[in-house]
Image (cartoon, helix red, strand yellow):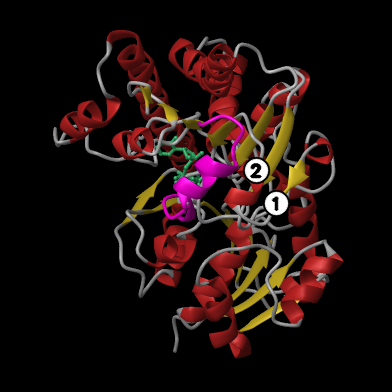
Amino acid sequence: HPSHRRIAIFGAGYIGLVTGACFAELGHHVVVRDIQPERIRLLNVGELPIYEPGLGDLIARNKERLTFTLDAEEAVRDADVAYVCVDTPPTPSGDANLSRVWSVIDALKAASHLAAVVVKSTVPVGTAARVRAALDAAGLSHVGYVSNPEFTAEGKAVSDFLHPDRVVIGSDDPATAELIASLHEGIDGPVVIMDTASAEMVKLAANALLATKITFTNEIATMCEATGADIEPVTRAIGLDHRLGPHFMKAGLGYGGSCFPKDSRALRAMASNAGYAFQLLTAVIEVNDLQPRRAIQRLKTELDGLGGKTIALLGLAFKAGTDDMREAPSTVIASRLLAEGATVRTWDPLAQPGDSEPWSSTTRHFTPVEAMTGADATLIVTEWPQLVEVPWDQARAVMRRPLVFDGRNLLDPAAMAGLGFTYMSVGRRTVSG
Ligand code: UDX
């Protein structure tokens, strides 16, 4: 097919693998390159270094159009288009660290007929101009540049990629924009073309607004606790206003993950570098940092102190459906609980917390009921659907005290009270059996 291209993808993380597998599914020839030997080894034996539903099947189905390598030169040698999907971790100031992006640009010198470089990594606004200058300096001035921010959410990345709300293509050159738009033939969603700086801004602004919506909801939940209102019907009714919509209004322990915390800090840092204090975003970041701490404070008051108490943490991943613990509220919560002198028992169906602090000071258990055995309180941190199915009557029998703090408003307060629990949640009245 004439519109099928050779694509090199740099970075075999969530974004790179999903992008590579989906482009192979659309008929393109894809080489994915990563610097971590273990990642490439796993991929070459048909295993996934990350957990993402549907991705394994997609890779297996498109084996003949999808290869994995450690060799950057091999990846770009025949490529028409190179995608940069490496991570851009925040520096202590909140700015993104672009060193991995620069090393990819360096590797592109080996390409013989490269037409375009596409940056999918989240980068500060203005990066396009810097990459353009780096490409020119590397003798790649004939190579076009596209900023193509990624909006896929973990857990549904494959379907988000193939059925996006929109594909944003930022380019200062119409022919390159057209080339990259054509790669998306077969994708079910509108393509929006704009200049590079605007495309970079869309990503940061969209994530900051979603983070703001969640945080606003969490503050209304706090007001519900203070006034006796109930956040669930409040958000349901607010969400029926089509100007506001029902999504991202679930009160909880604050947003986490690889994008919202990082992107909101990056936008704030960008504003401050530009001499502007982004006050609203600063407040969002502060309120979100406090959200898990508020939950612990409530638990501490209810238990008359946490020293010597045993707490079961159910769910470690930053959200359900993923093994990802990046910036998960569970980490802050476990650290705080340990610092207060509590014993922490954990359960999660997927996340592997590893053995660094705070996790090396906690114990892991195979089932929620096992984790709750002997506990003075249970804290639900991740909205795993399995937790709805827990035999809560059994949990009640094995816990030392019947106290559940549901940080995700997953369970039914009346049912929990009916089983004899004291049941606390976010933005809803505390009930006791
Ligand atoms: C997000 C964006 O959705 C995606 O567009 C972007 O490209 C990357 O960041 P992701 O981090 O995978 O994706 O997770 P998402 O499902 O958006 O949730 C982010 C965080 O917000 C999670 O910690 C989640 O628990 C929390 N959240 C979300 C709430 O607390 N309440 C909500 O109503 C929604």
Determine if the C-beta at disc 2 is less than 8 A from ligand 1.
no
In this orientation, which residue lies closer to the viewer: 393 or 271? 393
Residue for point 59% across, 43% down:
398
Element assignment for label 1: loop
Residue 415 versus residue 22 in the image, above or below: above
Residue for point 62% across, 62% down:
16
Q: Which residue is mark 1?
A: 365
Query: Which image quadrant for residue 117?
Result: bottom right
Q: Position of residue 110 (x, y in %)?
A: 79, 68
Element assignment for label 2: loop
Instruction: Compute the Cα span from label 2 to label 1.
Output: 10 Å
| Mark number, residue 157 | none
Magenta-highlighted residues? 386-402
Residue type for callout 1: His
| Mark number, residue 373 | 2
Residue for point 47% across, 52% down:
390
Q: Residues within 10 Å of mark 2 (few under 14, many from 20)?
A: many
Contact, CB < 8 Å: mark 2 with mark 1? yes
Horizontally, residue 26 falls left or right of residue 328, namely left
Magenta stretch containing residue 380, yes or no?
A: no
